[in-house]
Image (tube, rainbow, N blue to C red):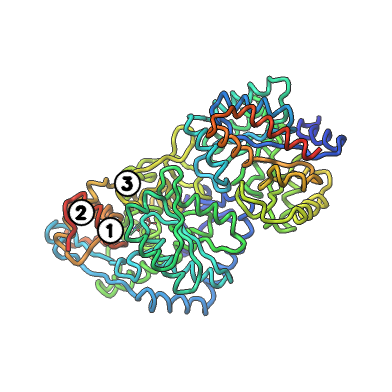
Amino acid sequence: MKIKRGIPLIDQHDKNGFYGGKFGGNYVAETAIQPIKDLSNLFEKLRRDKKFLKLKDHYFKNYLGGETPFFKLENLTNYLGGAQIWCKDVSAIHGQAHKGYHATVNALICKAAGKKYIVGDTGAGMFGKNLAMAARELKLKCKIFMGTKDIKRQAPNVKFMKDAGAEIIPVDTGSATLVDAVSECMRYYVSNCDTTHLAVGSAIGANVFLKICAYSTAQISKELKTQVIEEFGEIPKMKLVNVIGGGSSAIGFWSEFIDYPKKHVELIGVEAKYCAPLTTNAKLAILHGAAQYCLTDKNGQIKETHSISAGLDYPGVSPLHCFLKDTGRARYCSASDEQALAAFKLVTKLEPSVKPSLEPAHCLHEVIRLAPKLNQDEIIIYNNCGHAYKDQKIIKDRIGYFPS
Amino acid sequence: MMNRIDLAFKKGQIEKRPLLITYTVCGDPNKKKSLEILKSVSEHVDIAELGFPFNCPQADGPDIQNSTYRAIENGINMKQIFELVKNYKRYKNSKPLILMGYYQIIFHYGEKKFVKKCKEVGVDGLIVVDLPWPDNKNFAKLCKKNSICFVQLIAPTTTKKRMKLIIKDSHEMVYQISMISTTGKKLKVSAKEIIRNNKIIKRINPKKNVVVGFGITKKTISSLKECDGLVVGSAICKAISASLKSRQNPVIKLNKMVKFLKNKII
Ligand SMILES: Cc1ncc(COP(=O)(O)O)c(C=O)c1O
């Protein structure tokens, strides 16, 4: 299994949609085959269409707010006394998480397809909120599928979605979390694929869905590459650390750097401890339309997961990350609830300007572990992909306060 | 040699009626009762579809999901399902049996091992909801080699060109999905339209037996009599749920219901 150089990672699949011959594919019901084919043709056309690209850039700049900041975490760096720690603060985007990119692109594609209805899944509520806002912006009718457990624990985002005029469909099956929300949303699509555009919340699902997602979040690394060159005059030796739920933020953070040798640009993904298919050598399984490493029980049923972070509470992972893992291009590790909370505490104390949500707090654990072991000329860049406002209550309950 | 599924359709043709095909989930409401239900309804049905549960299904409506969750909660697994099929097949009134489910369970078990076991216990056919053509080509061949009918699916969204290719690779029975829907939703298209689509499929190869499923209930079944076979799934799973709720014996209730369905199409 090998990554080809000079070809975007998302395009390195075979004619059946498999990366490395075994990850991904299109395991979907016959009813959805033609609508998915139509969507795929449309997407391939749009991404080469100058007018569409201009429109996308217009929305990224004027609606999402343009380039997100890149800065050094001086205090954290000094405190840990090792590598320089830099932050790409994607949470500064309108919508406060990287989900804004694929929510917006999906809404634009829906519009281009001439469809009026858009549906999506959400766990942390970040994709739901961003899709609801993009739908309002583009005058689309929007439904968001969300587990009842997540509706409770991510209440601030539920309010955002409602205020943006989206209908929230509570999902109470199974563990009542993201995995069930995605299943229900995909079922809704099977029933309404003639009128409705499906926006999948991460780089998961049948081939075209993960491609649209990763294509959109790639904006992060396009900006980062320019910012890094501006700052250092070159692409220095660096480590890019990102949290992995489904893997949409990480793939977007890394996509411009895939072709660099591992020794030059190291890619490190951090999973939540009990939702860690890549860290725990989980078996290959078919979930939500794609073959991927996924937590399953001895009978092959998809396992329930547990994480303090709703956005990471998912048993599977993007086929793209399975591909990066098996080719050795990226390495993956995990952090527990407690480790994420401890990292949150330390970082927010030293760096009052960053407020990571519980998802990126997981990868801060790895940053804090790594930095002291490295020299001061080494560079770690961390993707602060979401804002903590949504986790205020959970954090307060667990650590006793929420930093102002 | 004629497959048992083919024989069932021959019988239907002679009797000038569509086949009645029921779908129940293996292990619902429990292992023992699901075998009893299967045996009991066999008095009236022509082919029995038996679901092997998966907890992240992409095309099941709420009724089949309820049955599935009950079965999974009872700890059902493929080993038990194959045992149950073997027991059922020993029963004198048993009918051709089609296992239906999602690819993950087959993939986890191992394709070859799964098909071999199917053959060993007497499974006559397989429906895999999320293994569409052409990705199912090799698996369908493997089934054929083991005298198991791999049932290809055709949906209202399937283009004519694709339909022809699917039919070319199909075995004795083809499954026409009546409408753009998951299972168990109300029929949102007219019987006329379903039959029109059915004729389009039949015209491509009149020898193929084309059954219709999704949205078929006591109310709608008689309007589709012209087809080769009719599958009732959600309505049956719903009846099991209802009988559990009212503490009735689902075996008796289901037998009555299936008899009623049969009378509607003969
Ligand atoms: C801020 C944030 N980061 C990360 C994730 C995890 O998803 P992914 O790995 O697709 O970025 C989520 C999911 O909701 C999120 O809200």
B244 on left or right of B167: left
What's the residue at 45%, 50% (across, down)? A171
**For disc 1, does the CB lie below 8 Å from ligand 1?**
yes
Q: Are marks 1 and 2 in contact (CB under 8 Å)?
A: no
Q: Which residue is mark 1?
A: A357
**How far, Cα to Cα, is label 2 from label 3?**
17 Å
Taking depth in this image into account, of A263 and B51 the one nearest to the observer is: B51
What's the residue at 71%, 25% (across, down)? B94
**At label 3, which amino acid type do we have?**
Ser
Q: Secondary structure at mark 1?
A: loop
**How far, Cα to Cα, is label 3 from label 1?**
13 Å
What's the residue at 58%, 25% (across, down)? B33
**At label 2, which amino acid type do we have?**
Lys
What's the residue at 68%, 36% (across, down)? B22
Front: mark 2 or 3: 2
**How far, Cα to Cα, is label 1 from label 2?**
13 Å
Residue B26: x and y, percent? Answer: 58, 31
Q: Which residue is mark 2?
A: A396
**Sequence-first disc among 1 and 2:** 1
Q: How packed is label 3: few (under 14 Cα within 10 Å), some, or many (20 or more)?
A: some
Residue B111: x and y, percent? Answer: 59, 36
Quadrant of residue B266 within the rendered picture: top right
Taking depth in this image into account, of A188 and B216 the one nearest to the observer is: B216
* Image-quarter location of ligand 1: bottom left
Q: Which residue is mark 3?
A: A307
Residue B209: x and y, percent? Answer: 78, 42
Quadrant of residue B136 within the rendered picture: top right
Q: Is residue A330 visible to the viewer in this orientation of the structure?
A: no
Q: Are marks 3 and 1 in contact (CB under 8 Å)?
A: no
Q: How packed is label 2: few (under 14 Cα within 10 Å), some, or many (20 or more)?
A: few
Quadrant of residue A217 within the rendered picture: bottom left
**Sequence-first disc among 3 and 1:** 3
